[in-house]
């Protein structure tokens, strides 16, 4: 079991504050999560590539990094789509003009569909290939980051599992 100190040391390696690589990796992950949450349509090529190669766990791992964003998008745009359908059916607001509701409904439907496909791909893969996902998780948790040399048994094992034969 990892202690808080080891977790913090892993997340904030020595010299992290002046490491451009650390900052760019963090910003890229945050930006990708925000894009997956709010503008899911932009990630259609990534989702289609993962759909074509759904047996390749390395490709699905890129979707897994932003699964929270896809689930958020699915909930956000799914509820927005339901709200728009209710507005269309009841017609009790000034917003019920078809010229406004149709593009909004199309945008919500496309975003929700992309998010649903991405979430389903990752969840199906995690269910079917759970042993491979657990190995990848072990490597992700224990592999030395930022070109640091391994210091523990787990780090050596993660490096061994990560290098091709």
Image (cartoon, helix red, strand yellow):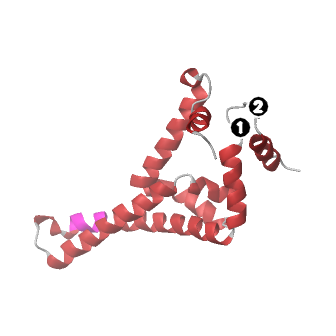
Occupied quadrant, residue 85: bottom left
| Mark found first going from the N terminus, 1 or 2 | 1
| Vertical relation: 130 (above or below) 146 | below
The structure residue drawn at horizontal position 66% and vertical position 72%, both measured from the top left corner, is: 128
Marks 1 and 2, how far apart at CA: 7 Å
Could you tell me if residue 156 is visible in this image? yes
Overall secondary structure of the magenta section = helix
26 vs 83, left or right, is: right
The residue at the point 64 percent across, 47 percent down is 1
Instruction: Out of 131 and 59, give the one closest to the viewer.
Output: 131
Please provide percent x and percent y for residue 99.
22, 66
* Viewer-proximal residue among 122 and 100: 122
Query: What x and y, as percent, mark residue 46?
Result: 57, 56
Question: Secondary structure beneath disc 1?
Answer: loop
- State the mark number for residue 149: 2
Numbered circle sitting on residue 75: none
Q: What is the span of residues highlighted in magenta in the rendered image?
A: 99-105
Q: Residue at x 63, y 68 (%)?
A: 125
Q: Is residue 25 above or below residue 50?
A: above
Left or right for 145, reference 153: left
Residue 161 vertical position relative to residue 114 in the rendered view, above or below = above
Question: Any magenta on residue 45?
Answer: no
In the image, residue 103 lies in the stretch drawn in magenta? yes
Q: Position of residue 144 (x, y in %)?
A: 71, 37
- 101 is higher (above) or lower (below) than 140: below
Of residues 122 and 97, the one nearer the viewer is: 122
Label annotation for residue 144: 1
Tell me where residue 140 appears, x and y as whole percent: 67, 47
Quadrant of res 98: bottom left
């Amino acid at each position: 079991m990892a202690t808080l100190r080891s977790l913090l040391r892993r997340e904030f390696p020595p010299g992290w504050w002046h490491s451009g690589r650390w900052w760019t990796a963090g910003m890229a992950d945050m930006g990708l999560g925000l894009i997956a949450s709010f503008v899911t349509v932009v990630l259609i090529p990534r989702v289609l590539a993962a759909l074509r190669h759904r047996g390749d766990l390395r490709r699905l791992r890129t979707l897994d990094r932003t699964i929270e964003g896809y689930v958020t998008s699915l909930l956000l745009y799914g509820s927005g789509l339901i709200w728009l359908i209710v507005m269309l059916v009841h017609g009790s607001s000034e917003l019920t003009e078809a010229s406004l509701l149709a593009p909004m409904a199309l945008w919500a439907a496309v975003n929700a569909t992309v998010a649903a496909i991405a979430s389903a791909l990752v969840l199906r893969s995690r269910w079917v290939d759970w042993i491979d996902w657990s190995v990848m998780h072990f490597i992700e948790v224990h592999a030395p980051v930022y070109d640091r040399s391994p210091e523990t048994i787990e780090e050596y094992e993660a490096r061994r599992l990560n290098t091709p034969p």
